């Protein structure tokens, strides 16, 4: 597992090393971020974009934050636009549509990301509509993991895989499923027979 740090400046010296060795970057967005800390986040995003190293995994973990977290994340995402050094991305915990939109411009323009995982997020079909162009345009994507997200039901599955069929990505790993199997749990979007049929249709039609 990638170590997740609260101090982004710790990674900058390693990213600036004149080497092509792979590196992992794990970051924790807490409940509040000062302006001084925000500058450190922007500096880290610049280092990730400019590094000669490939970032094997960028792991972003979120707590419930205030506007300072959102403004810092927006600046972080803006600095990453055009970045092609990140191989895989994990978005974990309290990330919803607001947080996702802070990263949207980077993701939609990214055609180099090889893996993306949504881990226990608050994302639903609306969020994945915003990521339509990412799934349709990224022809490098090999791993897609949306297991265990309560908002991923039939409609979200249809949106994600429909966008994937528009593109040329050749997935090697597709992980979709639920962790909460209790009946009628509020806020949980269920995958039904319709969702299974969508997955089967994707498998049949995909070039993967």
Image (spheres, rainbow, N blue to C red):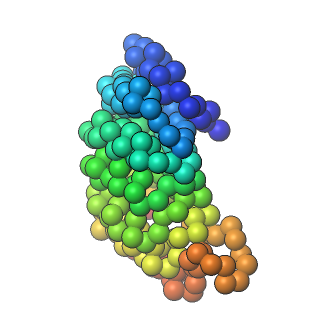
Q: Is residue 89 above or below residue 201?
A: above
Q: Is residue 113 above or below residue 17?
A: below
Asked if residue 194 lies left or right of residue 125, the reply is right
Residue projecting furthest to the bottom: 193
Residue projecting furthest to the right: 182
Front residue (pair 129, 195): 129
Question: Which image quarter holds the C terminus?
Answer: bottom left
**Residue drawn at 70 percent across, 71 percent down:** 180
Front residue (pair 171, 175): 175
**Residue drawn at 58 percent across, 53 percent down:** 93
Image quadrant of residue 205?
Answer: bottom left
Residue 70 percent coordinates (x, y): 40, 47
- Does the image show residue 202? no
**Residue drawn at 58 percent across, 75 percent down:** 187
**Residue drawn at 58 percent across, 31 percent down:** 5
Q: In the rendered picture of this protein, how many numbered marks are placed on residues?
A: 0
- Does the image show residue 38? yes
Asked if residue 132 lies left or right of residue 116, the reply is left
Front residue (pair 168, 45): 45
Image quadrant of residue 73?
Answer: top left
Question: Which image quarter holds the N terminus?
Answer: top right
Residue 80 percent coordinates (x, y): 32, 38
Residue 154 percent coordinates (x, y): 50, 79
Residue 179 percent coordinates (x, y): 68, 67
């Amino acid at each position: 597992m990638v170590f997740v740090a609260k101090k982004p400046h710790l990674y900058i010296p390693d990213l600036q090393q004149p080497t092509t060795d792979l590196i992992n970057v794990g970051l924790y967005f807490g409940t509040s971020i000062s302006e001084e800390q925000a500058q450190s986040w922007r500096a880290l995003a610049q280092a990730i974009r400019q590094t000669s190293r490939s970032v094997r995994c960028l792991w972003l973990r979120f707590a419930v934050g205030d506007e300072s977290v959102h403004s810092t994340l927006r600046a972080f995402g803006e600095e990453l636009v055009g970045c092609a050094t990140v191989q895989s991305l994990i978005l974990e915990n309290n990330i919803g549509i607001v947080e996702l939109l802070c990263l949207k411009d980077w993701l939609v323009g990214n055609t180099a990301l090889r893996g993306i995982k949504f881990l226990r997020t608050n994302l639903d079909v609306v969020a994945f509509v915003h990521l339509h162009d990412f799934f349709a345009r990224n022809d490098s994507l090999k791993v897609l993991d949306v297991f265990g997200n309560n908002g991923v039901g039939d409609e979200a599955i249809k949106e994600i895989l429909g966008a994937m069929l528009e593109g040329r990505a050749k997935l090697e790993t597709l992980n979709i499923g639920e962790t909460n199997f209790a009946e009628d749990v509020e806020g949980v979007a269920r995958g039904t027979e319709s969702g299974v049929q969508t997955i089967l249709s994707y498998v049949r039609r995909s070039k993967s």
